[in-house]
Image (cartoon, rainbow, N blue to C red):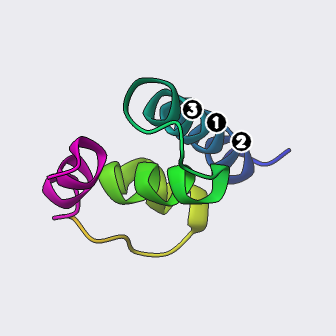
Amino acid sequence: MRTDQRKAHAAGIDLWNIAQRYKRVYRSDLSDRMALKLAILANPELGELYVGSPVRRDGMPEVKKFLLGE
């Protein structure tokens, strides 16, 4: 496995763990897909490694509002 693939794989695992935490702690009604998208938006550096394209840098406040139901 190439280094880039390893980094993308490791980022994916980290994002998956974050997504599962969002579901467990904040919103059990989230689908896996939505939780992963929120994790990518809230963690743009990991998200860029995982998806291979730019991710917004200002998404964390919106993710926080959504998870807290504000």
Residue at the outermost bottom position: 53
Closer to the observer: label 1 or label 3?
A: 3
Q: Is there CB contact under 8 Å for labels 1 and 3? A: no
As measured in the structure, the alpha-carbon distance from the residue carrying label 1 to the one carrying label 3 is 15 Å
Query: What residue lies at 40% left-to-right and 74% top-to-bottom?
Result: 54
Packing grade of label 2 (10 A; few <14, some 14-19, many >=20) is few
Q: Nearer the viewer, residue 42 or 49?
A: 42
Instruction: Give the residue pinned by disc 2.
Output: 6
Q: Amino acid at mark 3?
A: Gln
Query: What residue lies at 37% left-to-right and 33% top-to-bottom?
Result: 26
Query: What residue lies at 51% left-to-right and 35% top-to-bottom?
Result: 23
Closer to the observer: label 1 or label 2?
A: 1
**x and y, in percent, of residue 20 in the image:** 57, 32
> In the image, is residue 64 part of the stretch drawn in magenta?
yes
Closer to the observer: label 3 or label 2?
A: 3
The numbered mark at residue 20 is 3
As measured in the structure, the alpha-carbon distance from the residue carrying label 1 to the one carrying label 2 is 6 Å
**x and y, in percent, of residue 36 in the image:** 55, 52
The numbered mark at residue 49 is none
What segment carries the magenta color? Answer: 58-70
Q: Amino acid at mark 2?
A: Arg
**x and y, in percent, of residue 65 in the image:** 17, 52
**Element type where label 3 sits in the image:** helix
State whether residue 44 is above or below residue 53: above
Q: Is there CB contact under 8 Å for labels 1 and 2? A: yes
State whether residue 48 is above or below residue 14: below
Left or right of residue 61: residue 20: right
As measured in the structure, the alpha-carbon distance from the residue carrying label 3 to the one carrying label 2 is 21 Å
Query: What residue lies at 46% left-to-right and 62% top-to-bottom?
Result: 48
Q: Quadrant of the N terminus?
A: top right
